[in-house]
Image (cartoon, grey):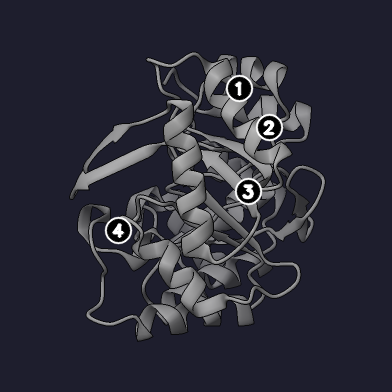
Amino acid sequence: MGTVIPIGGEPAAGRLGFGTGGLVGPGYWGPRHDGPAHSVALLRRAVDRGVTLIDTADNYGPDVAEELVARALHPYPAGLVIATKGGVVRTGPDLWHIAGRPEDLRAMCEASLRRLRTDTLDLYQLHRLDPRVPMADQLGALRELQEAGKIRHIGLDSVTADELARAQDITPIASVQNRYNLLDRAAEDVLTLCEQRGTAFLPWFPLGNGALTDDAGPALAAVAARHGATPGQIALAWLLHRSPVLLPTPGTSSPAHLDENLAAAGIALTEGDMARLDALGRPHEA
């Protein structure tokens, strides 16, 4: 299964990262807690437990998650990858729009640099491709920021296999962040392309937005019982066994749930386990 996966060749990240969506309020709006102490402690606990990738975005809050990451972890320890996203503007709970004009992306990147208190973003992912702006213009803006030393690696979020292939013809793409989990494999063709090209795949909603943290069926429950694990742990372990390029970043606001998620990396699934779990979901058209 391996313990590290390269993002753009370097730096390397552990197979289980930490997503910061759980540190903000419902609809990704405002802080989840009255003060920052709980979130700061949780972020530090994640890194202390060996997490080497923190996945965040400028519109989580908005601004809130990035500011918490900096408050908790800056100055960043060697080997810690901070990944953030831009290209989406949030205007209220569950309200957002895509903003992919080059001038928008440049401004968003600069703002993330300030909030994260760094000169270079390890991984900057375009949160959504803007259908109103040529792909070459959007990626060209990110490439210019990369050449200026403000971005180390470029990633994409929620793309089709065709879009990924076209993007890779324009500039190197280090990572993709699409929805993918045990029961939802609509992005199977994207995963295949990532495997072929050595691109990291960060599956969002790796636990089905909570659906896989409880009993999602007898087969999952049976595998979990055999390993003395929870269904959520087995769902994460399945991702780690499914492909060497998969790098899940489950989020939570609970220290106990954080520990439970990270323990999934130690579960060794058998070929029989994988066969039973593979049968729970089938690739389908997005």
Residue visible at 70% across and 42% down? 148
Query: Amino acid under label 2?
Result: Ile
Which residue is labeled 4 in the image? 61
| Marked residue nearer the N-terminal end (3 or 2) | 3
| Marked residue nearer the N-terminal end (1 or 3) | 3
| Residue 173 image label | 2
| Marked residue nearer the N-terminal end (1 or 2) | 1
Tell me how far mark 1 sits from mark 2, CA to CA.
8 Å
| Residue 164 image label | 1
Q: Quadrant of the C terminus?
A: top left
Image spot of residue 250 (x, y percent): 48, 59
Residue visible at 36% across and 86% down? 37
Q: Secondary structure at mark 4?
A: loop
Contact, CB < 8 Å: mark 1 with mark 2? yes
Image spot of residue 93 (x, y percent): 18, 50
Image spot of residue 253 (x, y percent): 36, 72
| Residue 125 image label | none
- Viewer-proximal residue, 172 or 214? 172
Which residue is labeled 3 in the image? 123
Image spot of residue 177 (x, y percent): 53, 40
Left or right of 148: which side holds 251?
left
| Marked residue nearer the N-terminal end (4 or 3) | 4
Residue visible at 45% across and 79% down? 42
Query: Amino acid under label 1?
Result: Leu
Query: Amino acid under label 4?
Result: Gly
| Marked residue nearer the N-terminal end (2 or 4) | 4
